[in-house]
Image (cartoon, rainbow, N blue to C red):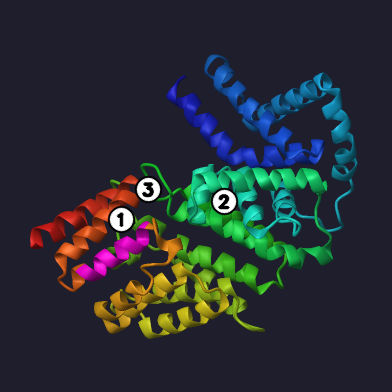
Amino acid sequence: MTGRAEDSVEAVFREERGLLLAALVRRFGDLDLAEEVTSEAIEAALVRWPAEGVPPKPGAWLMTTARRKAVDRLRRDQAYAARLAVLQVEADAPPAAGGLPDERLQLFFTCAHPALPAEDRTALTLRCLAGLTTPEVARAFLVPSATMGKRIVRAKNRIRTLRIPFRVPDADELPGRLPGVLQVVYSIFTEGYAASSGPSLQRLDLAEEAIRLARILRRLLPGEREVAGLLALMLLIHARREARTSPDGALVLLDDQDRTRWDRAMIEEGADLVVAALTGGPPGLYGVQAAIAALHDEAPDVAGTDWPQIVALYDVLRGLAPSPVVELNRAVAVAMRDGPAAGLSLLDTLADEPRLRGYGPFSAARGDLLSRLGRSAEAAAAYREALELAGTEPERAHLRGRLAAVSEEQ
């Protein structure tokens, strides 16, 4: 296998997998079958492309191969084909007027069906449409991989048992499905912004895919303020992408980033969307987070950031969607406003929170505040804990550096 072929398969997988899977589900009405033949098509490409060359239209090649494999399987298994016949009637139903412009989003809304538990909807969509691995999905929800694997299997079984149709929701169904879809899109972005594992801090392909999907949602539902809020949040965060790592891939903290490298056009677009998200009704979850991101992006430096306003926005956010991660982020903002002792006091109240056990950013934040207070031995212990939990090499390298620095101070 040449490096070029491997790179081509990976690039096609990232670009085409969701489209391929959604089209196959639409055609055959069965998610497991679609996943299996998609994987088989990729495996066939890994065998044939190194010898025959990458085809001019690799996505079309994968689609043709996957369809043939699906048809062959159904011909061999008449009982399976009979079971699919009922599903196929529903899958072939004509799309609603003004249907979604992207088959992947059709499947996003299907996987976000209200008959599925909320946690299962997001897990299934991330795994099947975004192509995240089960450990990556698990990391997004701070649960073990085994637990997440069970959720994904459970969601598939429920779709099969309830015979949930793979179709575009009607217009009056869209608002009820929207929160689940927004959560899925943001989870994809989060994995792109801060990869759960691997040699790189960021997976820009995932972040950009999430932004692309959010733009489609924005065009589809221009009056939904939380769609504007989510798109704004992702743009305002993604605008810092070039400054978040050094030329050699090392992590660069917000305090040390060269703000001239931030994408000002993206920041301006995001700031305009924040206004749309916060105008015309009570604030929403994504609109408030976008407002926090805008304050960071508009500040000349960390010292000049409006930390009192950021803390106030976190107070709003904790009322909308209370969670340990919100409390962690609020504590860090309080530390910037009132000093490290105040922030550490808040972090200590979260020490027994089960959902923060095994969450590296919590330990890293404690290490930073303890270091600022001159409590080097305790800071070293916190950094060691964070180092054990870090998923990417840039994070580990940064924490090793922090650990070495505080160890010298002891």
Kindly state the secondary structure of the residue where label 1 is placed: helix
Spatial separation of the CA atoms under disc 2 and disc 3: 22 Å
Q: Give the range drawn in magenta.
A: 360-370
What's under tag 3, amino acid-wise?
Gly
Q: Which mark is residue 39?
A: none
Which residue position is annotated with label 2? Answer: 209
Is 361 colored magenta in this rendering? yes
**In this orientation, which residue lies closer to the viewer: 208 or 183?**
183
Kindly state the secondary structure of the residue where label 2 is placed: helix
| Mark 2: few/some/many CA within 10 Å (<14, 14-19, 20+) | some
Which residue position is annotated with label 1? Answer: 386
What's under tag 1, amino acid-wise?
Ala
Q: Which residue is drawn at 55% across and 48% down?
A: 147
The image shows residue 260 at horizontal and vertical percentages of 34, 65
Which residue position is annotated with label 3? Answer: 391
Label pair 2/3, CB-CB below 8 angstroms: no
The image shows residue 398 at horizontal and vertical percentages of 26, 53
In which quadrant of the rendered view does residue 362 lie?
bottom left
